[in-house]
Image (cartoon, rainbow, N blue to C red):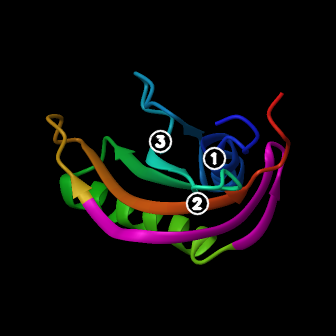
Amino acid sequence: MEGFPDVELALMEILTPLGKTGVVFDEELTIRIRVNRTGGSADRLGLQDNAVVTITSLVPKQTNAASREAAMELNRQIRAKLGQARAIATAVGFIDKIAETNSPMPIPDPNLDVRCIESTWMVTSRLQELPA
């Protein structure tokens, strides 16, 4: 949305210390944290963006139980990094608040060697530049 920070890029920057991030998983499964804006909108005045973002942690090619536990651990690290975060400056703009809206849940994958754990977040930012 024009005038607001790209929340996907902002969250990928914040989460990069935990592992490779992206908006899609690559074929080699080297991306471990997927960040997708899945909804939300600006407030009625157009001054604040309330983005709904899904963050998925992926762990491939271990035993089924070990993959699940490793994916849950990565999700715990994500939750610790983002949990109720406030006032975060990123290269793409300033994020006012990050709050978890849905707890982690496993996402089934046809490939039993891959485990995904997904959680949903509300990412709030203010208008940072006026649209042209």
Residue 36 sits above or below residue 42 on the image = above
Report if the CB atoms under discs 3 and 1 are less than 8 Å apart.
no
- The quadrant of the picture occupied by the C terminus is top right
Q: Is residue 4 magenta?
A: no
Residue 126, compared with residue 13, is above or below; it is: below
The residue tagged 2 is 123
Q: How far apart in space, not on screen, are marks 2 and 3 (Cα)? A: 12 Å
Q: Residues within 10 Å of mark 2 (few under 14, many from 20)?
A: many
Q: Where's the N terminus, which quadrant?
A: top right
- Kind of residue at badge 2: Val
At label 1, which amino acid type do we have?
A: Val
Q: Position of residue 74 (x, y in %)?
A: 47, 61
Measured along the vertical axis of the image, is residue 72 above or below residue 118? below
Which residue occupies the foreground of this view, 124 or 86? 124
Q: Are marks 2 and 3 in contact (CB under 8 Å)?
A: no
Q: Which mark is residue 48?
A: none
Location of mark 3 (residue): 36
Identify the secondary structure beneath mark 1: helix
On the picture, is 89 further left or further right than 117?
right
Give the residues drawn in magenta, as a range.
86-105
- The residue that appears at 59% across and 48% down in the rendered structure is 19
Point out the tag, 3 or 1, that comes first from the N-terminus.
1
1 or 2: tag closer to the N-terminus: 1
Residue found farthest to the top:
27
Q: Look at the image and say whether residue 94 sits in the magenta stretch.
A: yes
Q: If you read the primary sequence from the N terminus, does the residue marked by circle 2 or circle 3 appear first?
A: 3
Which residue is at the front of the view, 102 or 64?
102
Pointer 1: what residue? Answer: 7
